[in-house]
Amino acid sequence: MRVLTSAVTLGSGLVVAGLLAGQIASLGPGNEVCVDVTGFSFSPPVSSPPVEAGVRVAGATATRLCDGTPSFGQQLALAGIRLSWPLFGFAAVALFAAVLRGISQHGAFVAVVAKRLFVLGVFLVIGSLAAALVQSGATALLTSSMAPEAASAWLRLDEVPWFGLLTGLGVIAVARILRLGKTMREDLEGTV
């Protein structure tokens, strides 16, 4: 079990390190920055949105905006769009590996495992919301820097990470069950 948890942690760490290295390498002059504007509205509604100088509208239905000479802020926004979910995923896998390590060392019905599982559940709820907000906010900032008349909410209902929220709540419930199992186990050992 220790080999599995170490392999999972190392593998996900290498993937995130590769993503970070690629993103850092893409910062700098000469790299085009594009953003998908499918969910954005323009006032007044137009078929081709008014954009800043140097920005081109790509796609048959004006669904992408691209800037060939992006500012450093635009490149950071693109990094936020690309890296928010991979960083969240790496942290979630590392926390899950800690849960597996606790189970392999102590068993399932101990306080350490219940606490780690609770922390994982809370992280899934808060972290998935934070990753979605970072990605949506960076997308909104990047779009408004290219097309100032674009209007969008920072987190639309179709972008809420329901899977992460519900999974996190389920993991919190399992942690509570394990904590109760630990208490029942201690009571049983005390009466025997």
Image (cartoon, rainbow, N blue to C red):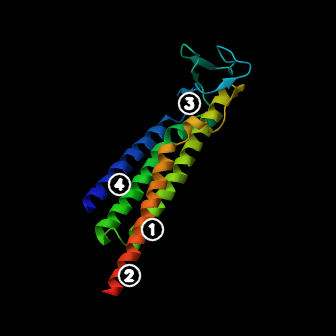
> Quick one: quadrant of the C terminus?
bottom left
Labels 3, 2: front one: 2
Residue 29 appears at what percent x and percent y?
56, 30
Dot 3 lies on which element? loop
| Front-lying residue, 85 or 187 | 187
State the residue position of label 4.
9
Q: How many marks?
A: 4
| Front-lying residue, 14 or 150 | 150
- Disc 4 versus disc 3: distance between alpha carbons? 34 Å
- Disc 4 versus disc 1: distance between alpha carbons? 20 Å
- Disc 1 versus disc 3: distance between alpha carbons? 47 Å
Residue 47 appears at what percent x and percent y?
64, 13
Which tag, 4 or 3, sits closer to the chain's start? 4
State the residue position of label 3.
29
Per the rendering, the mark at residue 179 is none
Labels 4, 1: front one: 1
**Would residue 120 be seen by someone viewing this image from the given angle?**
no
Dot 4 lies on which element? helix
Residue 70 appears at what percent x and percent y?
60, 29
Which tag, 4 or 1, sits closer to the chain's start? 4
Residue type pointed to by label 2: Asp
Which tag, 3 or 2, sits closer to the chain's start? 3
Query: Compared to 59, does 39 lie above or below?
Result: below
Which tag, 4 or 2, sits closer to the chain's start? 4
Per the rendering, the mark at residue 187 is 2
Residue type pointed to by label 1: Lys
Dot 1 lies on which element? helix
State the residue position of label 1.
115
Residue type pointed to by label 3: Pro
> Quick one: quadrant of the N terminus?
bottom left
Which tag, 1 or 3, sits closer to the chain's start? 3
| Front-lying residue, 120 or 135 | 120
